[in-house]
Amino acid sequence: MSVTAIIAAAGSGERFGAGIPKALIQLGDKTLLEHAVASISAIVDQIIISAPAGFEKQISELVGAGVVVVTGGATRSQSVRAALSQATGDYVLVHDAARALASSDLAGAVLTALKSGHDAVVPALRVVDTIKVVDADSFVISSLDRASLVGAQTPQGFKTSVLRAAHASGSNATDDGALIEASGGRVKIIAGEERALKITTPADLHTALAYLGFDETYRSGIGVDAHAFASGRPLWLACLLWPEHDGVQGHSDGDVAAHAICDALFAASQLGDLGSNFGTDRPEYADASGAQMLKETLSIVSAAGYLISNVTVQIIGNHPKISARRAEAIAAISSALGGIPISLSATTTDGMGLTGEGKGIAAIASALVFKR
């Protein structure tokens, strides 16, 4: 009997605040999606990923040949239905990319329970908190008996025909087990696992990192960069092109924000500095973009066993005005660094020095990393 795995990966990740789809956020040496694919691929015959619109090609390149990628919908159920239309297996495991660390053993246990004769199998953990029902004004209506409560996880397993029938209504639910329940089916609960937590916030990411062997020994670093303006060169700043402004002198594109961040990351991880890693004696970095240097810095830092917690950068200069494009810049920097949280601000020097006299632009950055 063949098995299809559907990985729901179309979530925007807005609650994470990374500026990229949540499935593409870096967790250790892989993205959340890559972790999910790696854990489930050993026990299935087909993998289908529902991707955010516009990211289909990027995700296909990330996971490689042999994985089917479809465009996800506006809701989780719509995304699963899009993938389900391509499923060829007799059984289907529906998994969330956000539960990236769910083990192969858990997926195997779900599949074993399915093959024993159940139509639907959901892993879950017993609820340990007291759950209260509240009204619109936040007053308690009742307290539930937690002895009968469980928190559902993924991967959830189904006979493919049964799941297709449940989705035929076009209804939406927060998980596929709920659709089976709504259609009158029986759902078998089996023991879940702590490591199958749903990664929704940066705090969840830190919890997940503990399962990968990262400790909480933080290191910090500071980086500074400054360049004089140069007429005729394009201005690249915070991984964005600012076409109405002159660029700066430099071996690369002169993106002072990106360079300061690179320096801060190298300082925090004790891996030299911008010059020792991307110096002017290396012609391959002539006109290199700030985004390229950030990506390569991420690779160097990650290879040394460090994970980036967060980065803060302040741009110093009279122009350009950053506020109108702040969100765009944060998203671009975060994307180049694997989806980490970014803080970005700007200031002037009240007419003093290189930046105050309008002769150039500068940036100062701080970075927090911790080691595996």
Image (tube, grey):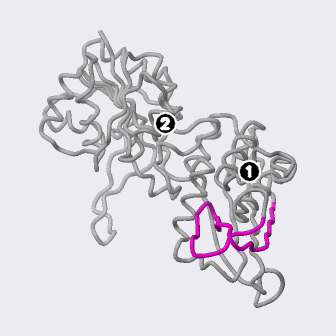
- Position of residue 276 relative to residue 119, above or below, is below
Callout 2 crowding tier (Cα within 10 Å): few <14, some 14–19, many ≥20: many
- On whether residue 352 falls in the magenta region, the answer is no
Q: Quadrant of residue 320?
A: bottom right
Tell me: residue 36, above or below residue 174.
above
Q: Residues within 10 Å of mark 1 (few under 14, many from 20)?
A: many
Q: Is residue 324 left or right of residue 120?
A: right
Q: Quadrant of the N terminus?
A: top left
Magenta stretch: includes residue 228? yes
Start and end of the magenta stretch? 222-249
On-image quarter of the C terminus:
top right
Q: Is residue 114 left or right of residue 169?
A: right
Q: For the residues marked 1 and 2, what is the alpha-carbon distance in whole angstroms?
A: 22 Å
Residue at the image point whose x is 64% and y is 36% from the top:
29
The numbered disc on residue 369 is 1
Q: Position of residue 367 (x, y in %)?
A: 74, 58
**Image quarter of residue 163:** top left
| Residue type, mark 2 in image | Leu
Q: What secondary structure is the stretch in magenta mostly built from? A: strand
Q: Which residue is mark 2?
A: 33
Q: Position of residue 4 (x, y in %)?
A: 33, 21
Q: Residue furthest front?
A: 232
Could you tell me the amino acid type at mark 1?
Val
Q: Nearer the viewer, residue 220 or 122?
A: 220
